[in-house]
Amino acid sequence: MADFDGYRGNSLEFLRRSEAGVGDVVEVGTEWGVITGTLVPRYQYDDDRHIVLKLSSGYNVGLSIDRLKGLTRKSSGERPAFVPPPSPPPSPKEELPRVAILGTGGTIASRVDYRTGAVHPAISSEELYALIPELSEVARIEPQIIFSVYSENIEPENWSRIAERVSEAVAGGVDGVVITHGTDTLGYTAAALTFALQDVPLPVILTAAQRSSDRPSSDAVLNLVGAVSVAGYASFSGVYVAMHEGESDARVALHLGTRVRKNHTSARDAFKSVGVSPAAFWSRREGLEIKLEGLPQRRRGANFSPKPRFEARVALMKFFPSMPITLLDSLANSGTRGVVIEGTGLGHVNSRSIPFFRRFIEHGGLACMTSQCINGRVNMNVYDTGRDLLSAGVIPLEDMLAETALAKAMWVLANSNSIEEARSMMRASLCGEITERTLR
């Protein structure tokens, strides 16, 4: 039975009449001559007047069915299937550290279908181990899948599951944990796990890739090898993000889980520490170079009790000119317990919004202020608007990143006994989320 993935309407009927489906090699007549290629899927919401062929050159071409002189199926297509190479044998080196790799999905756990050009989340942790045999010389890998989703689909309940699996791995005696994740919400997850896994006695390293692991230009291999090496051997503990320092394959930067954000949509060095130096760098040649003092040390046999609960009813809102009060009211009316505002400059919103925050806080809501600026810190004492917000009860969060503030507010509301305690916890720097002084 033919597969018509993504085709609909007129293009679907055209293919059915030709008895050709996705994956088939077809020959079409055009005003430029005969074109031969493999019929590939289309995005389901594209128009219904075109078909797409992948040519032998590797390029895709879209053709209007209204201008085709016919289509002939030359051969039946075989649906592409990824067959991972065999895993290397378990390392006989018992002296190597045990490192758990917990898979959650994302580009680092994806592959390219080279017949269609599409990226699919289809590589498991075991397959990653098979694709990077070098890992068997670094550590005794213990891979497992927690779930496999794109990171934009990760919710606070997923953070809880990850934290619980990390706790189980720690209790099982591993020397370190690596979490593979998508890049888009990696900063949120890193911050959430930093709060949920406070006092974790070993390194927990989140890593990702901007380009899937089977692309020649992939950053997956260096990121994963670096993450496993740090997880297994580093003298420090805590939650970190391991990603390329630059566009070359020279070094991996280790960022504090509460001070990192994605600053580029596609570059391999998209992740940067904000307001602080990276905690460390790792390279194949130089090994681990620690840059920050005072990192918590790895501890053997330490008691560890995670707090993996999060309150999902918290909103992150970016203030914008003419923001309607009805938008704020809709949050309060939907049962929202906390709001993190990305204000302008030193921490401002328009004056019309201030009565809302006063009402929201008087009814037991948690309202906190961050800045839309990447660098610098909130100071709400400078102008009248800021002072009015402080009077209403809005909490200034110094130089805390907005993504970190959202994750922290969700964690605080789920792990405090009163709104007063929650407000006090938001003001305190629990995991390095607030720095003592602002760097340029």
Image (tube, rainbow, N blue to C red):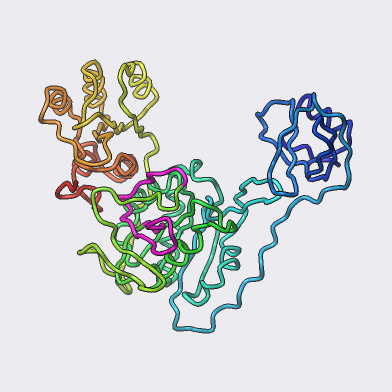
* The magenta segment: 241-266
- Residue 116 lies left or right of residue 121; in this view the side is right
In the image, 235 versus 11, the foreground residue is 11
- Residue 239 lies left or right of residue 29; in this view the side is left
Indicate whether 77 appears above or below 354. Answer: below
- Rendered location of residue 407, percent (x, y): 34, 43
| Magenta stretch encompasses residue 259 | yes
Q: Residue furthest front?
A: 32
State which quarter of the image contains the N terminus: top right
- Residue 67 lies left or right of residue 367; in this view the side is right
Task: Classify residue 7 by image quadrant.
Answer: top right
Please give the name of the residue rendered at 79% of the width and 45% of the height, measured from the top-left corner.
23
- Rendered location of residue 114, percent (x, y): 68, 51
- Residue 147 lies left or right of residue 346; in this view the side is right
Please give the name of the residue rendered at 61% of the width and 54% of the height, measured from the top-left corner.
111
Please give the name of the residue rendered at 81% of the width and 43% of the height, measured from the top-left corner.
36
- Rendered location of residue 138, percent (x, y): 47, 75
In the image, 324 versus 119, the foreground residue is 119
- Rendered location of residue 141, percent (x, y): 51, 71
Task: Classify residue 406 by image quadrant.
Answer: top left
Report the number of discs. Answer: 0
| Magenta stretch encompasses residue 319 | no
In the image, 19 versus 148, the foreground residue is 19
Please give the name of the residue rendered at 33% of the width and 53% of the height, measured from the top-left corner.
257
Indicate whether 22 appears above or below 199. Answer: above
In the image, 363 versus 312, the foreground residue is 312
